[in-house]
Amino acid sequence: MQKIQKVVIPAAGYGTRFLPATKAQPKEMLPIVDKPIIQYVVEEAVASGIKDIVIVTGASKRAIEDHFDYNHELMHMLKKQGKEKLREEIKKIADLANFVYIRQKGSYGNGTPILNAKSAIGNEPFAVMWGDEFIDAKPERLKQMIDVYNKYGGIVISGVEIKNKEDLKRYGIAELEPVENNIFKIKRIVEKPEPNKAPSNIATHGAYILPPEIFAELEKQKPGKGGEIWLVDAINALTKKGVPLYTVVIKNGKYYDCGNKLEYLKTNIEFGLKHPEVSKDLKKYLKNLKF
């Protein structure tokens, strides 16, 4: 079985929920304390054994390329100022992986950026992770998924346990068939169900391991809801052809959705409370905050 060595990160959206902040900067570059969202995604991929990062970008996304590139002028300035630790930290960002950038072309929808990455992926299985959300987990979410793929093959989607019943209507919820421990076969996915009609409390989203055959199915897809090309339609087409579909409910992890304002603010507060430079003062500030 081929190893998973490449990940596609779609990052071409306009980030309209964060306008005007995202008018001239990518949503994926919004900071969580002092590190952009997409860097958490890339670091998770690298820690899971990924060598090649394919980022699908669009207009006003050049900052992503600059972030993962060397900035020799900045590193020279930091060296001159004696800030060697910070200089090394900046240098390591560019050394994380091999980066490939592709401009998105074609219809809207979350299937389009994946199809755009076809030439960079070739005929091998690969992972997909969204650029504006991540799971903080040990072992890493993607590592847990790769372990499942190495054992069972097929398609693997990360599973997240939704503890608040009312939140089930925000996600695609899976009907499951147990395999072993926290691994399940997915019988079907119900998109944004009413909480009392949800087939489980496991949302399947955020990261995928896909076979190269997904590209042929994406090419066949006609625009669906909203005139967009949807990844789930291509996945469903493959499962009808007998490709098994699994989810692994991620252990020891917490999901951070930075795609909307409230969850983004919550994530910043939570990571700020863990940050060695600001945690003490932030705790004091929050404790004394008047509502």
Image (cartoon, helix red, strand yellow):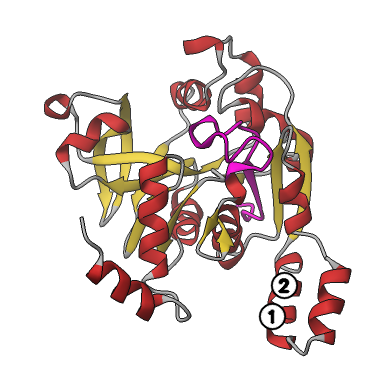
- Quadrant location of residue 175? top left
Q: Which residues are magenta?
A: 1-27
Residue 57's place in the image compared with 258, above or below, is above
Q: Nearer the viewer, residue 278 or 243?
A: 278
Identified by mark 2, the residue type is Ile
Q: Is residue 118 visible?
A: yes
Q: Which residue appears at 62% of the width and 53% of the height?
A: 4
Find residue 119 and report its horizontal and vertical position in percent: 79, 35
Q: Is 11 within the magenta?
A: yes
Identified by mark 1, the residue type is Leu
Q: Are marks 2 and 1 in contact (CB under 8 Å)?
A: yes
Find residue 229 and report its horizontal and vertical position in percent: 57, 18
Q: Which residue appears at 33% of the width and 35% of the height?
A: 186
Q: Which residue appears at 76% of the width and 73% of the height?
A: 91
Using a 10 Å C-alpha cutoff, classify the residue at mark 2 as few (fewer than 14 neighbours), some (14 to 19) or many (20 or more): some
- Asked if residue 43 lies left or right of residue 252, the reply is right
- Quadrant location of residue 194? top left
Residue 134: assigned label: none
Using a 10 Å C-alpha cutoff, classify the residue at mark 1 as few (fewer than 14 neighbours), some (14 to 19) or many (20 or more): few
Residue denoted by label 2: 90
Main SS of the magenta segment? loop
Residue 16's place in the image compared with 282, above or below, is above
> Helix or strand or loop: what does disc 1 sit on?
helix
- Asked if residue 225 lies left or right of residue 159, the reply is right
Q: Nearer the viewer, residue 143 or 124?
A: 143
Measured Cα–Cα span from mark 2 to mark 1: 6 Å
- Asked if residue 185 lies left or right of residue 228, the reply is left
Q: Which quarter shows the C terminus?
A: bottom left
Residue denoted by label 1: 86
- Quadrant location of residue 14? top right
Q: Residue furthest bottom?
A: 82
> Helix or strand or loop: what does disc 2 sit on?
helix
